[in-house]
Amino acid sequence: MRLPRFASQTFSRLSRNFQNTRSPSVAALSDVQNDRVNGLAGIMSKQNNKRRISPALPYVQLIVGMALGMVFLVGWTTATAGVHSLPKVRTEHHRRHRQSWVVVFQETFENLILPNPVWETDTYPDNGFSDDGAFFQNRGVIPPPAFRASAPFGKKNWLTVESYSRSPTTVLRDLFSITSDPAGGCNKVLRIASPAHTDATLVRSTRALPKRYRISLKVGYANFGNGLPGNNGYTGGELAEPWLADKAASEENGFYWLTILDTVPRPHNNVYLHHHRKVVLDSDNNVPPWMEIYNGQRFMESGETPLMMIGIDGKGTTNELNGKPFYSYAAGVWQPSGKIRAVDAYKSMTWYRASIERNGDRFTLKVTGNFKFGGRKTYKTTINAADKCVWHYNRKPLAADSPCIDNSHYPSLPNEPALWSANIAWPDFFMFGEPHNNFYEGEVFYDDIRLEIWRG
């Protein structure tokens, strides 16, 4: 770019005058040497020399500054012509850079004092398939006298523990307590236990989960049977009464690693829970086996310590006792609806890390640990709940043309709401523990529960 004529002539005159003086860089070097020799006197002499050396220096600086300013102005105007979106792109980059998961709640049980609620007479909350719901009333089932104890805990009461027992003398600390890590050391963990198969205890989110979340925890050292012939972790002779009075409880024993329900989780009979699950990480040690486990090469019929990673198929055929069929994740893919298959088998004396994440209509299930067949491994999968019509996935009303809508009714509950109405929204609550009050006997440990949300 050419400078204006006035600026060019003035700059030339001052440059010639400046050549008659010594070089500033040489002067500066000489002054530094003088400073080292003469100390303060040298510094004062240097300042006087500056004033004698270049009386025209301020004018040179002014003209050079004006010239450079004009160069910058013209150059910037040319360079940015037609690219007015540049600031927006930079802002978008910074916005993406700030996006991350943020832990909003965490419970490690190191300094926590658990609540000590009192037993209250069970008033049979909920309906439909609940303990005194219409489904069992129609079958002539009378629930036994029972008691519940519930209390929130943790920062801002973000967690709630609830227990069920058929005796008001049951010691709550036998059902849930803070204890030493079974792996050793000084770490503190949560123990959930069912000394009797008619006991039940779960921990849930006190409030419905936010729009985008990730809930994670450590779970392990489970002792809920093993799926082998025999008592399968029970004392012996227990029945799944009164709701399934003709079924031996020892046929199934297990616990929930982590699951998302469509309603406030409470201990209930197993049938009730089957109708409210969305996605699940759980284990059911069953004998004789009614499922398969992937052993790294093939599926084998077995009910021994399976880890199930499942989504509930809302479009599948309804079974009133078992709920909707499963989508099971195993062998690296989602299996066809109705195939009950485990991703691997867990080890009893081992800790695992489990998480469920939701982003829009997608659920991501993840478990990391040392497995029976896969060894040290992470199993992770995502399911598009809208595409697969995962049971009651929607947290706002469905579109009128959604393929998930089902306005039919359970045959035994014609007066209950339709199975999946378009105008009903279903919240997300997480739950872990042992929620069945007619199955499961044993103990399991949990630690480091985290709720993260997405910010940015």
Image: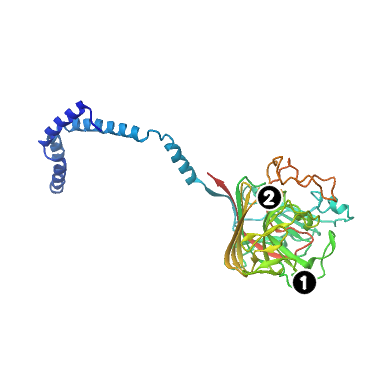
Q: Secondary structure at mark 1?
A: loop
Residue 247's place in the image compared with 31, above or below, is: below
Residue 247's place in the image compared with 65, above or below, is: below
Q: Is residue 246 left or right of residue 328?
A: right
Residue type indicated by callout 1: Asn
Residue type indicated by callout 2: Phe
Number of numbered discs overlaid on the protein picture: 2
Residue wearing tag 2: 429
Work out which quarter of the rendered image holds the N terminus and state it.
top left
Q: Is residue 448 visible?
A: no
Between 388 and 271, the one lying in front of the other is 388
Quarter of the image holding residue 21?
Answer: top left
Residue 308 in the image: state x and y as whole percent: 67, 61
Q: Is residue 145 left or right of residue 190?
A: right
Please give the label number shown on residue 231: 1
Residue 58 in the image: state x and y as whole percent: 19, 31
Q: Is residue 89 left or right of residue 193?
A: left
Between 79 and 217, the one lying in front of the other is 79
Between 420 and 267, the one lying in front of the other is 420
Badge 2 crowding class, 10 Å Cα cut-off, few under 14, some 14 to 19, many 20 or more, is many
Residue 401's place in the image compared with 291, above or below, is: above
Q: Secondary structure at mark 2?
A: strand
Q: Residue at x 75, y 68 (%)?
A: 289
Residue 89's place in the image compared with 261, above or below, is: above
